[in-house]
Image: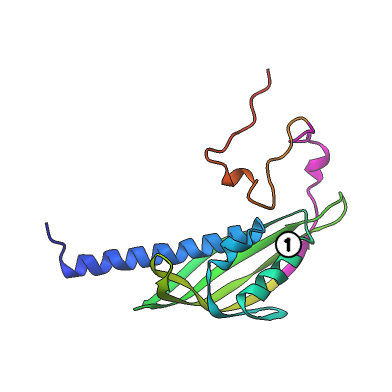
C-alpha cells in the first residue's frame, strides 16, 4: 500500500520533531548525570553555545556546565514548553527550562533558574546517517532564585539509609542507566 505524499510529509515532520525533542532530553540527562559523551552528542562540532556568562564551543561549555553541576548535591534540568519551526534540514526551536540545584545542609537554600533555550538545529550527515543536533544556541536565563528547604523534611523519616542508599548517581551507575532498573525490596 502506497502512502500519499501529504501523509508522508506529515510523518516525516512528526519523526523530525520527535528526534529534535529526543536531543533535548539527552542534553538534560547528559548534564544532570555528568555524562559528557551524551551531552556532547547533542551538538555539531562547530556549534556556539551562548549561555549566560559562557559563550563558546560545546566541549568548553560542557566543562563549564560540569563546574556548575558539581556545586550542588543534585541537579535537574526540567524541559517544559517546546516549540519547533521546521524548515527543511533546519529547525528553529524554543524550549522553556527549569534548572534546580539541591544544596547541602538543612539551612542552605536550594537554587532554581528558569529560562529558555533558543536553538538552531540542523540535520546533517552523522555517524549512522542524517541526524539532528544543535548548530547554535542562545540560552536566556530569565530568573534565578533561592528556595528554602521544606520544613516537612524534619518531620519525615529519611527515605534512604546506609543499608538502602539512594540509587541516584552523577554518572552511568545511576539507576536510570540500569536495564532493567532494580527497585529496593519491601521491608518484611
In this view, the residue farthest toward the front is: 127
Direction from residue 100 to residue 136 in the image, left or right: left
Residue at image x 78%, y 42%?
A: 152
Residue at image x 86%, y 56%?
A: 108
Q: Quadrant of residue 142?
A: bottom right
Direction from residue 5 to residue 150 in the image, left or right: right
Q: Residues within 10 Å of mark 1 (few under 14, many from 20)?
A: many
In front: 62, or 19? 62
In front: 156, or 60? 60
Q: Secondary structure at mark 1?
A: helix
Q: How is the image coloured?
A: rainbow
Percent across and percent down for residue 135 are 50, 78
Give the residue at mark 1.
69
- Is residue 6 found inside the magenta-colored segment of the image? no
Q: Is residue 178 above or below residue 112?
A: above
Direction from residue 104 to residue 159 in the image, left or right: left
Q: Quadrant of residue 138?
A: bottom right
Q: Is residue 164 above or below residue 22?
A: above
In this view, the residue farthest toward the left is: 1
In this view, the residue farthest toward the top is: 188
Residue at image x 59%, y 72%?
A: 116
- Is residue 160 found inside the magenta-colored segment of the image? yes
Region rendered in magenta:
144-162
Q: How many marks?
A: 1
Q: Is residue 176 above or below residue 11?
A: above
Q: Quadrant of the C terminus?
A: top right
Residue at image x 75%, y 35%?
A: 160
Q: Quadrant of the N terminus?
A: bottom left
Amino acid at each position: 500500500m502506497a502512502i500519499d505524499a501529504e501523509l508522508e510529509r506529515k510523518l516525516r515532520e512528526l519523526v523530525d520533531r520527535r528526534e529534535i525533542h529526543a536531543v533535548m532530553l539527552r542534553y538534560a540527562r547528559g548534564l544532570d548525570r555528568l555524562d559528557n559523551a551524551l551531552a556532547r552528542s547533542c551538538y555539531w562540532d562547530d556549534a556556539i553555545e551562548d549561555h549566560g556568562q559562557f559563550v563558546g564551543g560545546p566541549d568548553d561549555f560542557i566543562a563549564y556546565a560540569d563546574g556548575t553541576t558539581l556545586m550542588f548535591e543534585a541537579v535537574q534540568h526540567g524541559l517544559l514548553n517546546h516549540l519547533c519551526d521546521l524548515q527543511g534540514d533546519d529547525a528553529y526551536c524554543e524550549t522553556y527550562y527549569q534548572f534546580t540545584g539541591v544544596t547541602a545542609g538543612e539551612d542552605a537554600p536550594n537554587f532554581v533558574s528558569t529560562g529558555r533555550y533558543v536553538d538552531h538545529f540542523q540535520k546533517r550527515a552523522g555517524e549512522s546517517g542524517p541526524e539532528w543536533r544543535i548548530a547554535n544556541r542562545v540560552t536566556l536565563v530569565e530568573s534565578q532564585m533561592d528556595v528554602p528547604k521544606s520544613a516537612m523534611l524534619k518531620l519525615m523519616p529519611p527515605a534512604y539509609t546506609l543499608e538502602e542508599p539512594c540509587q541516584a548517581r552523577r554518572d552511568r551507575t545511576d539507576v536510570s542507566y540500569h536495564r532493567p532498573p532494580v527497585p529496593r525490596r519491601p521491608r518484611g
